[in-house]
Amino acid sequence: MSKTKVLTGITTTGTPHLGNYVGAIKPAIEQSWRDDIQSYYFLADYHALIKGRDPKRIHQSGLEIAATWLALGLDTDRVTFYRQSDVPEIMELNWIIGCMTAKGLMNRAHAYKAAVQANEEAGEKDPDKAVTMGLFCYPVLMAADILMFNAHKVPVGRDQVQHLEMARDIAGRMNHHYKTKFILPEAIVGENTAVLNGLDGRKMSKSYDNTIPLFCTEKKLLKLIRKIKTNSLEPGQPKDPDGCTLFQIFSAFANEAEIAEKRKQYEAGAGWGDLKNQLFEYVNAQLADARERYNTLIEDPAFIEAELKKGAEKARAEATPFIANIRKAVGISPFA
């Protein structure tokens, strides 16, 4: 049976939080068990250098992310789980396809345009002030990540769809000029993907510093849940669960019957304090076993390293002959 290749990159710039788990990690791991899909998951540590300036944080983030995915049940025998920097062929392909990428295409990238606009609005004489080549060429490296394994589908947020279109454009140019056979990847935009709100009611994001770390201690989990912003309705007053962050988080973990029962509690006027304590008890119970596995893994970085090296060997088994064919196609090959 022909399998669909699905590739997912995780940038190593932060600690996994509840929003990451509900919106990306959980559905990705569930998908990895499908027999019709060949899954690739990688730690995008080179991408992290674009904005990350703290070497210790990037290193620690990679460890935490790898431990998180393993603790949540990722089967590394079924998937290819690797670190971007362990597959040097990706960076080689990055250069090759970069030589076929029009600067005008990169000029249209949203992140670059936003940086230029911010400079212009600030009255800077140089519209490219503080714009690095990493930021400017980010879409090329992303294309290399995807095209190296000829991924058919790439799950992305709406802000990344443009990059998938650029990857298709680059692949098309390579196929036309060098007669390569890159597959044109398709973006998977999760219309029903859960997006959790954070402590302040905005989207849970490390950019807003409003996250709840996935595997923080029980004490910290309770403290953070109690900090979630709610309205001033008193106990006994009916409350609207829709739009409530507490209810939203609960719903991301609960089944339909539990959600219906929780909705009745809101309508009956349950107090915010009780609702927060109940949310803590429920979420904590859901995460307890995985948290224990995570803490064990964090204390055994050698095991995590071995798992990533195993994944890199699997990835390079594909990447090495693939890049050899690309080299030949562009005229870089032995003379005899």
Image (cartoon, helix red, strand yellow):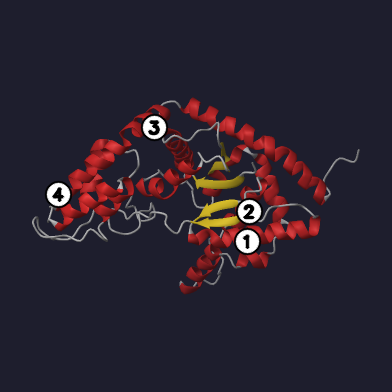
Q: Mark 2 — residue?
A: 143
Which comes before the other along the chain, label 3 or label 4? 4
170 is higher (above) or lower (below) than 122? above
Circle 1 Cα neighbour tier, 10 Å, few/some/many (<14 / 14–19 / ≥20): many
58 is higher (above) or lower (below) than 192? above
Q: Position of residue 45 (x, y in %)?
A: 54, 43
150, 139: nearer the viewer: 150
60, 256: nearer the viewer: 256
Contact flag, marks 1 and 4 (Cβ < 8 Å) = no
**Label placed on residue 166:** 1
Gap between marks 1 and 2 measured at Cα: 7 Å
Q: Position of residue 27 (x, y in %)?
A: 44, 46
Which residue is at 82% across, 46% downward? 328
Q: Inspect the image, locate mark 1, and give the three-letter code of the amino acid beneath it.
A: Met
Q: Mark 3 — residue?
A: 294
Contact flag, marks 1 and 3 (Cβ < 8 Å) = no
Which residue is at 57% across, 43% downward? 36
Circle 3 Cα neighbour tier, 10 Å, few/some/many (<14 / 14–19 / ≥20): many
Question: On the rendered image, what quadrant is the N terminus found in?
Answer: top right
Mark 4: secondary structure: helix
Contact flag, marks 1 and 2 (Cβ < 8 Å) = yes
Image side of residue 304 versus residue 86, left or right: left
Mark 2: secondary structure: helix
Gap between marks 2 and 3 measured at Cα: 32 Å
Q: Mark 4 — residue?
A: 273
Mark 3: secondary structure: helix
Which comes before the other along the chain, label 4 or label 2? 2
Which comes before the other along the chain, label 1 or label 2? 2
Image side of residue 151 versus residue 242, left or right: right
Question: On the rendered image, what quadrant is the C terminus found in?
Answer: top right
Gap between marks 3 and 4 measured at Cα: 29 Å
Q: Position of residue 218 (x, y in %)?
A: 25, 36
